[in-house]
Amino acid sequence: MDYPLIVDVFFVLLATLAVVSGWRVFATDSMVRASFFLLVSFIAVGVIMILLAAEYLGVAMFFMMAVEMMVMAIFMVMFMMNPAGLNPMMMVHQHKFSIAAGAAVFLVLATVALLAEFPDSPLPADLDPVASLGDELLGDSMLIFESAGIVLLTTMIGVVVLSSHRGRYGAADEGSMPPGLVPGGDPAGMPEEDDEGDGHHHCH
Amino acid sequence: MTLVTLLLLAAALIGIGFYGALSQQSFVMLMMGLELILNGVMLAAVAFWALSGAGAPEGQLLTIVVMAVMAIEMAMGFALVVAVFRTNQADVTEGITELKH
Amino acid sequence: MAVSWLQRLAARAAVPVFPVRGMHGEEVLYRLALTPGIKLVDSPRHASILLVAGGVPPDQHDALRRVHDQLPGPFATLWYRSEPLDELAGATRLDDPDALPEALKTIHRELMSGKRGSSPRLLPDEPPNPWEGLGDDGHGGKGMMGGVPYGRPMAMNMTDDIRDGLTLDSLTVTLGPFLPMLPPGLTAEVTLQGDLIQSWTTHSAPYPIALESVFFQALQGPVPIAELERARARYHLKRLHFALRLAGLDRLALEALRLAFAPHPGQDRAMALRRRLVRCGFFRLTTTGRGRLDENQARRVGGIAARAPGLEEDLRSRDAAYRRLEFTPIIQGGADTNARWCQTLAEIEQALQLADQAERDAVHTQRSDGVETPRGPWHEQWPEEASDLLDDLLPGLEWDEAMSTLASLDLAPLSPWSLEETSGAPVPTSVEERRA
Amino acid sequence: MIVSELILPVALVIGVLVVGAYLVAVLDEAIAGAIGMPRGGSAWLAPLTQGAWLLTQHANATEAPDWQAWRLAPALYLALAAIGLAVVPFSPTLIPTDLVTSVVLWGSVEALATVVIFLHGWSANTLLALIGAYRYVALGLSYILISMFVLIGVALPAESLQFSQVVTSQEGLWNVIRQPLGLPLFLIVGLGMTFWGPLNLADSRDLAGGTASAVSGPPRLVWNLARAAMLVAFSGAAASAFLGGWLGPWLPGPVWMLLKMLAVLAVLLLIGRLVPRLQPERCVTLMWVVFLPLSFVDLIWAGAAAFFL
């Protein structure tokens, strides 16, 4: 399928933007910038999707990722000690191995892309991508779509439980303990050998 | 913009994401690596759908599913970070040597 | 001449003034707020004129220099009843409140047309906290901990969080003395986590505020109750103006101020103001059930803060003249911000009603051994300065709640000078005699 | 072809944004004067003189700001307003960008606005701006959901995610009547995304201007302009989604559209002047406990109405 020249020009620009900002994610000191670089990478890919006629997916990418990266940035601020990047910062492990692994993955996938033969069958001219997606979601693949919905709901509940301050038997940071079976007795349902003390608190 | 160039772009994004996921100590940065991998996967899926799959609707569906996976990954990741941070006061991957409390 | 065309247009803009509220400088600012063509702004970055209203104690001159240097050029300073800093000896000084608006407009015009140069920078343009990072990657310490890279500790939290159990980064800053949301002169060291106040240490008390001379005269002998009560209403209305402006209700804030400056403010206008406040949702949307004082604190602050939770402390009820006017102290059932504003509005109405009644019968006060000031009872001693109770009160509140709590509390000490003396109005002789 | 596909839409969007932003300032000034604020000079001139003053004022620096983000944020916010307005149809033929998924694109503009506003407060590296940024995120994450449900509600009867189809679907009955909850909820979203009036949690007075508290000169002018432009873009979206866009008797379509946009603007600015700023915690509670369930109700209502009518 042949695209007009202007589309190719845009594609080259967007591809460069996507890769450069994707790389800057791991090369910037500021954690907030890192999350927004990732957002830029996603937006560039989203625009490429729109160029590919996937109009719904491209636009959905914008708002999904905007919200997601906003939350990500807030978490960065909360958990990182250098969120603003005022100090140089490099928190990596197995660095050389990771670079090699990343390069290897790229090379393998690139080889596949270059050498494999893919059928050349572009979109039919009369296809309405948005309507086709909608028909699929609420037609043949409804089960998959609804399962995804259920999984998301389960995730929400699980996440709230995991991150909630209140445990079943009291606040998490105070060491929630089940009550005894008899008044004043040992906590119920705790293994005998579980000795309270240093075992849990590893500050690396 | 051909299928090969699109796939090369996807491969580059996946490669960078792979590097990030393996090398970063911080949980949140690690998740960013995973997201970047999924970014490449989605791009590849849409590229196949548009240029090689004759617009089969399952191509778009796959992308939607990947988006859902991303949301789940994010949510679970953050919940883990919060839980680990509560007990260990750290958000680095080495912080979880045991996950019971 | 494109530039001069732009400058001519800029010269016609409403004059953006950042007021530094020094001692006894507030009165003139209320008048400026009602002046068309002058805009009092909240951030020095948004101003072209720094108006220092009232004196600033020497130990706060450094803070004043910092505020001065925050104004973006071109800017000028105007010193109203205040001694310019030594470096700015040539700056305009003015003592006449009536000449102030015109002077501000002239300075702005001259500044825009280039006739007047920008005020010089007073402090060197260098980072206040030089880089002190240590360690391999500049983390500023051993491993990844510690260090003070820019004179501030790394964003790590060593104190326990007080709300959600996540010990996240905290930020310690010094606020005041010229932050427009705080009472003028108040400085505090505050640790914030997001917008949650974790700790608050008051460093210096607010500047004293001046009461109208009629309160001083009431300690000398009988004064007309109408005058006394109108002065009381005016005092509360000015505080209400500040709080309403803070809540984004500019129009009603000005309404409160207009009522305060009206020659014969009637009770009906105060009631109308209260009705409009209720209708626009001020009590439901903006004020909070936070900032609760316990009984000791309420007694210490005195006045409205004491009567709102139900302490019937009011020197007026000892005065037979007030009793003849059927005065009984108003009380509310709560000790929080919301109750304090309800109390304030109720007392404004009550004061204006008493004034109307007293004026009809020309009633004078009968006792002069003590007077109930708007700030609390002034009997044998002054109403006490109570800003240190903020240290207990504010931690745990969000920024917005803390600011509205601060606005609802009247913590400043009373000035030994009357408002008329400090703002340039003719001083009633009795005050002079008393001081002599 | 280039004229009709590139220059005309761009000129239309920029023209409406600039004139609209100016009108927002004039209207706000006029409303302020009408309800009794002291006024010096004419409302028509005030925005121009204020703009000229900001152009002559120098742009300041703070200690170690995130320069790129700090300077980019106002421009990006303005660009978002332009993108938002670009999908608004002015007549069946006069549509700057007739994207098939324009309603979803409007949703993304709202989400990206949150990012940009956060960045504006974050990058200044000063306390009050930072608090404003944090607060705004809490607000932004709340109103985006409400907006999604309300917008799905208008897409239902149109059976399309395209604003022009949404307008066409209102030929019989405007959505403001068909879905009575929709427009009020959407106006709340609009106040949120421009942090105007009661929902001004980002640039509020208790933060001395919040995210804009440390900005002066031309960047502040761009920021103020972008806020006004976003209001204009929002009024366009609201007019097409609920007030029937270009539909109307006697007058040509674009004129109807502009009139409806002005009406929405007037309502928003009036709310901004009359209602106090919400306390942040109460605001978030209201959003999640009252308005979000109401938006569910709105969606169910819209679905039922689309099914039975």
Image (cartoon, coloured by chain):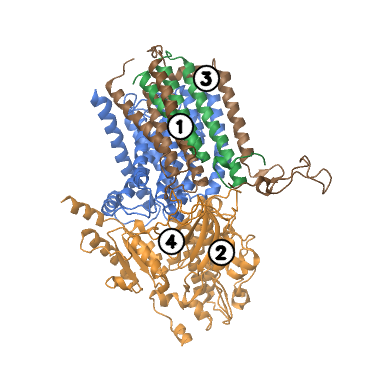
Chain colours: A brown, B green, C orange, D blue
State which tag comes first along the sequence, 4 or 2: 4
Distance, label 4 to label 2, CA atoms, is 17 Å
Q: Are marks 3 and 4 in contact (CB under 8 Å)?
A: no
Give the letter of the chain under mark 3.
A
Query: Within the image, what quadrant is residue C35 found in?
Result: bottom left
Q: Which mark is residue C180?
A: 4
Q: Name the residue under label 2.
A: C390
The label nearer to you, 3 versus 4, is: 3
Q: Are marks 1 and 3 in contact (CB under 8 Å)?
A: no
Q: Which mark is residue A137?
A: 3
User: Share a chain, discs 1 and 2?
Assistant: no
User: Share a chain, discs 3 and 2?
Assistant: no
In the rendered view, does A202 fall on the left or right side of D92?
A: right
Q: Which mark is residue C18?
A: none
Residue D257 seen by the camera: yes
Q: Mark 1 points at which residue?
A: B17
| Type of amino acid at the residue the image marks with label 3 | Leu
Residue at the (60%, 27%) spot, across then down: A150
Distance, label 1 to label 4, CA atoms, is 48 Å
Q: Nearest the camera: C61 or C28?
A: C61
Q: Are marks 3 and 2 in contact (CB under 8 Å)?
A: no
Distance, label 3 to label 2, CA atoms, is 58 Å
Q: Residues within 10 Å of mark 2 (few under 14, many from 20)?
A: many
